[in-house]
Image (cartoon, coloured by chain):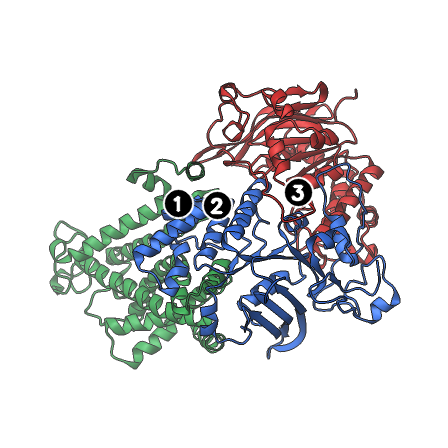
Chain colours: A green, B blue, C red
Amino acid sequence: MTVAAAQIARVPNRSGIWYFVRRNPTLVGGLFVLALVALAALMAPLIAGDPILAKPVNRLRPPSQVNWLGTDQLGRDVWARTVYGARISLVVGLSVAAIAMTIGLLIGLLAGFSRTVESVVMRLMDGLMAIPAILLAIAFVSLSKASVSIVVAAIALPEIPRVVRLVRSVVLSVREQPFVEAAVASGTRLPKILRRHILPATMPPLIVQATYVAASAILIEAALSFLGAGTPPEVPTWGNMIASSRVYLGLAPWTIFGPGVALALVVLAVNLVGDGLRDHLDPRIARRM
Amino acid sequence: MSGAPILDVKHLKKHFPVRRGLLQRTVAEIKAVDGVSFALAAGETLCLVGESGCGKSTVGRLILRLIDPTSGDIVFKGESITSLSREAMRDKRQRLQIVFQDPYASLNPRLTAGTIVAEPLENFDRLGRAEREGRVRELFARVGLGADALSKYPFEFSGGQRQRLGIARALALSPSLIVADEPVSALDVSVQAQVLNLMMDLQEELGLAYLFISHDLGVVEHMADRVAVMYLGRIVEIGQKEEVFARPRHPYTRALISAAPLPNPDAKRERIVLEGDVPSPMTPPSGCHFHTRCPFAVPRCRAEYPELRGEAGSHRFACHLDL
Amino acid sequence: MTAPLLDVQDLKTHFFNEDGVTRAVDGLSFAVAPQETVGIVGESGCGKTVTALSILQLLPPRLGRIVGGRILFEGTDLTTLGEGALRAVRGDRIGMIFQEPMTSLNPVLSIGHQIAEAVRIHKGASASAARARARQMLDLVKIPDAARRLDDYPHQFSGGMRQRVMIAMALACDPKMLIADEPTTALDVTIQAQVLKLMLELKAKTGAAIVLITHDLGVVAETCQRVVVMYAGRKVEEAPVRQLFTCPAHPYTRGLLASIARGKAGARAKRLKEIPGMVPSLREPIVGCAFAPRCQFAVEACRRQQPGLMPVAGEPQHQAACLRVGEVLAS
């Protein structure tokens, strides 16, 4: 019987990192880019100059040996500002994802299990989703002093309903599975059922969703900064860099290249990680039957 | 039947409301189980047989209180468990277990086989960790799985092996009664034989009572001591296996037996092929539920529902006619 | 002897994916005469459904491929035909019924439309002629109130009725052969009896040959004239139906028949005869007889070479792929 079991479970020899890379190119590609950006952000003081120091006499200089990406309208080094800007974007992306996921998970679990909670909560979520995320975020920010934490909270709020919906639908479908019934029949109490049987099933779609939320958060943060409703103007973010460089596009297009390309690259990378994770974690696609 | 039955079910009913509209008003009811009564002795196998929609699986779940009955009484080992609180019922679950139909969906794909079988033991916390593992190994051996299977995941097993895992899990707490809900229907014939043999051996060794739910008459005839035939939520015939199969009194039982294809090209038997489809449990026919498809129906059948004839414990059937 | 309607010669169908090759059908040969009902029986993974899909080349495009053998239908090798020519065969000369009627019927088209579609495409009939034919087919499969039900959708039918609709679709163009892949497995046993009875009646009426694929030996006994038993992608036995049940020659067939639960009168039944072990993996090429590891009669020679088909008891129509047929029959 055990020999036969081994026959059935013949997993082919999949060792080695190159096998993983070949099987999951999108995932690895995205992770690689993100890793580079994160590294750059971390080592900002070492590899970039001073993002805040303004030398008006050097304004709008094109890229040169001294200023790799040129200078902006106040003479600040664009390269330095771009690299420091990565910090904000990554922090915002990560924090928003973490907060939205945690709160969304808790609410979603409750909604999946309790009919009363569900009816109240889902209507609330529907209402929240009806309001455009950016408007909601702007309203939130304008009610309080601008700071990174406020921006994170403001962006996380409209993301929560999507997560709640996702978690709730997973909970509803997993709840019906015979193995959950079997757990009840074995005398497992509700908290343990949630922890051991329901929660793990929510993880794969949740993780994938987290990456999309992160990407969205980075873009929304940029939009907020662009609109002037985000982080304070001295703090370099890609959003406000793009905003202020609008006027000078004709004169000094390099002022937008740095933040623009960086933004696009990071959002793309995060989305690739999401897609790659989804393919990797979905057992049917991963086994490609 | 000697001594008190281990399970005594009386007039069990389960009606599912059908809700429509914004206010979720109940517009109709699905009478999935509509007045089922039977008793099961310790160490005995009672087979509930019927086609889809007859309510047999629902009966199984009602007995375990996985769903709550609309009315009726379930008496297990002399004690009524119908209205026990969730906590009190949980305690009873040690002696009352279930094996599911789907070997793929009844095991959590993310847990190892050892963890799955150990879960009932963890829930009741009677053994230390080492003892628990010993018990799990013992269970694995009893169902014919090697010790190296403990750390494998469900996807590494075949259908038959998974069903053995399900049986091992059901045995963990030394139950006296196991509800087996179509335990071999999803398996190949040769694998069915292995699992059925295992179940019979276990019954012999441990004195288990089985409430064996199936639609497969061949399996029923093999496993049962007694048989109960269900149609649209009610029992239409119940009795000792030999009697029911040799002399079926209800037209539906006859049709069922004659419909099952026998692996014998020369078999001569009465062929009753029913016309029409099974009626919906939402709108069961008046009078005898079976009269719309019954080749022997008379006007009385449409007007009046036939109660089960015969003494409790004997061969009973619900038909106006004497066939 | 008339030329066979369908002649499958040494069919080999393999599935390809990243993890390797699965030899789903590994050298299968059988023939079907006009108006004959042949059953292909075996357990899951034996290759019977893949055989059906191979005949009509309905294999999943990138994964499955016929890698060897010929499939002669009315003299033409179907494996050599292009997609256009194949489409002319499917539905028109060979009809097919699948196991799950709900997923084989388009849920957004009325069943009348779906039946008529085959007629319009293959016979070039006008819309009204096709509709009339669809109505005729529904009557043939005994669906009550056919005229009204032409415009109903699949979800408005029960499982048994949907399978009848599938049969109507398959027979609409009056094909010479019908391939039915587990047509009644998903149905209740009383409905199964209805559908099988219907299929036999229609066969008598239309004169179509049927290839019936199933795992249920009872169904085979009741409906088929000849039976092919498959195991691990190969044919292990072939016989006229009565012979297969009275005189099974291959150890697998014997094991299968012995393990079917059939009640015996009297006290609690004895243990069923089990076939020890499990089906071999089809990913590895199988050396020798596929059943040898589980066979009580196996000897060294069985493990070394794949046994050819031996005639059984002097009956030319009865063959078994076993080197030790004599011993098996004697036991």
Chain ID, mark 1: B
Taking depth in this image into account, of A218 and A95 the one nearest to the observer is A95
How dense is the environment of label 3, judged by Cα within 10 Å: few (below 14), some, or many (20 and up)? many
Residue type of the residue flagged with mark 2 = Gln
Taking depth in this image into account, of B180 and C109 the one nearest to the observer is B180
C110 relative to A80 in the view: left or right: right
A221 relative to A184 in the view: left or right: left
Residue type of the residue flagged with mark 3 = Glu
| Residues at marks 1 and 2 touching, judged by CB atoms closer than 8 Å | yes
Disc on res. C182: 3
- Residue A208 appears in which quarter of the rendering? bottom left
- Rendered view: B20 above or below C268: below
Q: Residue under circle 2? A: B161
Chain ID, mark 3: C
Could you tell me which residue is drawn at 69 percent across and 54 percent down? B241
Could you tell me which residue is drawn at 59 percent across and 35 percent down? C50
A240 relative to B259 in the view: left or right: left
User: Where in the figure is residue A59, as x and y percent of width and height?
Assistant: 16, 61
Q: Residue under circle 1? A: B149
